[in-house]
Image (cartoon, helix red, strand yellow):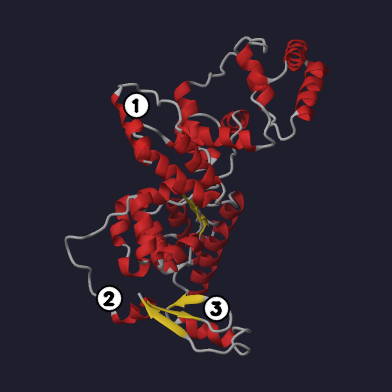
Amino acid sequence: MGSAMERARSAQASGNKRVAAWLPEMDRILIVGMKHGSQGIREATNKVLALRAGMTRADCWKRLRLLRERGNGGYPAPRSWPAEVKELLREGYQQGGEKKREAIKVVRNLYPGLPSNTPSRFARRQGWIPKTTQVRGRRPWTEHEERKLWELAGYETAARIAERLGRSEGAVRFRLKSLGLSVKVKDGWSFRALQEMLHVGPSKLRRFIAEGSLRVRDPRISATSLAALRDDRIAAGTVATEAVEGVPQKLRKNGNGYSWGSAARLLGTDVEQVREWIVEGKLKIVDGFVTERAFQNFCKSHGSELNDAFLGKEVRDWLVRGYSLPVGTDSPAPPMPGNQKHALVTRQCPGCRRPMRGNIFFRHIKNCKLTGTAGGRVLASRR
């Protein structure tokens, strides 16, 4: 690993803006990461970015795609295909239609596991695909835009990428598919997963969202929760029926979700009150999924608001390394409130052997079906 670092520094000192050839050590890191799922890919990508300065996540994604293609079936690279296969593919693309489909079918039968876009990509590089006249009004994709696609794919939705690039969502989806990239956001955290990892309650996590510290995939107010809160306020007499008499018709016009400003106008209140209802759980957001990039920004800017004692040493060190979580070493940590000290104690159920933190253990042990048949005493540890 030390020699890899020296070679990376020498490549950086040469003054080339483009990243040099990939090192075997970097490929091995990515291959090991792919074997451990999305979490392993995130950690492997962070290691590679730390290993070589100037490299971006887009470079890592491209390399991951190449390594996946090499690992599917062990087929050779297109430049190593036999001459008769290349000639068959060349004739198919030049004639087009049924001839092209038959040529692609023959090539994929010869090499099982070959990605569907490999023959067309090879034909385009060889110049076998005839160039067509650009349609008026259709803007070609620039190198900068494609690089942004590689960086944002898997982290943000197609609608959000289209908004960033100033293009339509359909154009972004079509381009992602032509590049062999998935439109689905795979890397990120669900609302419940963040609660379990950060050891925060749902109300505190919702407060992060309401204050704008933590960005979610779709922060709009769901129409169902908006209609339910409206009915509750009318039944309780806290709002006049005349003030929101047109709400049912407006709710039917947009059943997906409403911005916070629109929700405030429909309920006859202000945005600050809407934020408080979000924290209390009376208003629910449409999609609380947190992307990898949004979580990284949260750790950098607002990670100091998390309680280090609840995180634990392993999780805290992992967030510091991978997400730049600030560590407050200058000032001592504030004293733990008495009503939260129970969360520092970890107990293990004698039946299902599941470790749990805090007083929730006593509720679990009453309902655990394996506790009555298991012997032994309860194990408790204080972090």
Instruction: Choose top left, top right, bottom left or bottom right for residue 20.
Output: top left
Q: Position of residue 151 (x, y in %)?
A: 46, 35
Mark 3 residue type: Arg
Answer above or below: position of 299 versus 238: above
Residue 276 visible? The answer is no
Q: Position of residue 349 (x, y in %)?
A: 52, 82
Total tally of numbered discs in the picture: 3
Residue shown at the point (50%, 52%) measured from the top left: 39
For marks 1 and 3, give the one nearer the viewer: 1
Disc ID at residue 353: 3
Instruction: Choose top left, top right, bottom left or bottom right for residue 11.
Output: top left
For marks 2 and 3, give the one nearer the viewer: 3
Mark 1 residue type: Ala
Answer above or below: position of 13 versus 268: above
Residue on which disc 1 sits: 11
Task: Return the disc, 1 or 3, that comes first in the chain's sequence.
Answer: 1
Query: Seen from this angle, which residue lies furthest front?
Result: 3
Disc ID at residue 336: 2
Residue shown at the point (58%, 32%) measured from the top left: 176
Residue shown at the point (52%, 74%) measured from the top left: 235
